[in-house]
Image: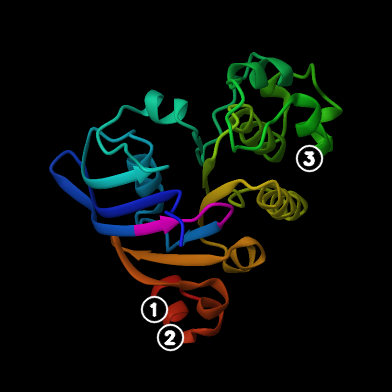
Amino acid sequence: MSEPLLKVTGLNAFYGRAQSLFDVDLEVGRGEVVALMGRNGAGKSTTMKALMGLLPRREGEVRFRGADISTLPSHRIARMGMGFVPEDRRVFADLTVMENLDTGRQPPREGAPQWTPEKLFRLFPNLGEMPQRPGAQMSGGEQQMLTVSRTLMGNPYLVLLDEPSEGVAPIIVEQMANMILELKREGLSILLSEQNLHFAELVGDRAYVLEKGEIRYSGAMHELVRDEAVRQAFLGV
């Protein structure tokens, strides 16, 4: 088997003196969608921030495309082709859709899908109808689409996607699911943080379940859906 695109071993993370992740191990293969699941406060967003180098104190090994990125700052990790879509969206409110996209632009990468505004507008027709609209005048769902698109303008190998279905209308959730499946068809790898089991089932190949900063389950997504004991214990569904 080929080496995973992302391989995490013994990841610990801290907020000040408080430890929030405990020996987290996970992998993401090339072209794979992996769901990181758990209740609020389980450590999903913390895991993504730690992988992206956004926490000041972290321990363990993180290998991305064969390179050890465990101690690299976030801007260098991004330049290596890891994209991050945070839960709180963070569009530039005063910039237009096109200007927001330009802020994320990076050169093409060998072996990674290549993105242009025109290609993204085919993926997100809503954005294509408002290229000159400022971010502040967009709905929450439209801002979510713009944040994803801005990240894709970096031509990443892997996208960390934090709670894409949180707080948006059902029609946007459906569009997000279709978007993730299209990205997978393009060959992009995705690590998805999600509480919505139905959404994760639609798009995910495998799942890890976090509880209080520890991995408590790992397996194929269809196995998690069938495992009522795990779902009740760690997801409450």
Q: Is residue 124 above or below residue 208?
A: above
What is the CA distance from the residue labelled 1 to the residue labelled 2?
A: 6 Å
Q: Secondary structure at mark 1?
A: helix
Report x, y in % for residue 102. 65, 16
Quarter of the view holding residue 199: bottom right
Position of 117 with respect to 16 (left or right) is: right
Q: Is residue 166 above or below residue 50?
A: below
The answer to whether residue 189 is magenta is no
Disc 3: which residue:
123
Q: Which mark is residue 233?
A: 1
Quarter of the view holding residue 135: top right
Report x, y in % for residue 34. 51, 59
- Kind of residue sitting beneath label 1: Ala
Q: Is residue 54 above or below residue 61?
A: above
- Kind of residue sitting beneath label 3: Leu
- Kind of residue sitting beneath label 2: Ala
Q: Secondary structure at mark 3?
A: helix
Q: Which residues are magenta?
A: 26-32
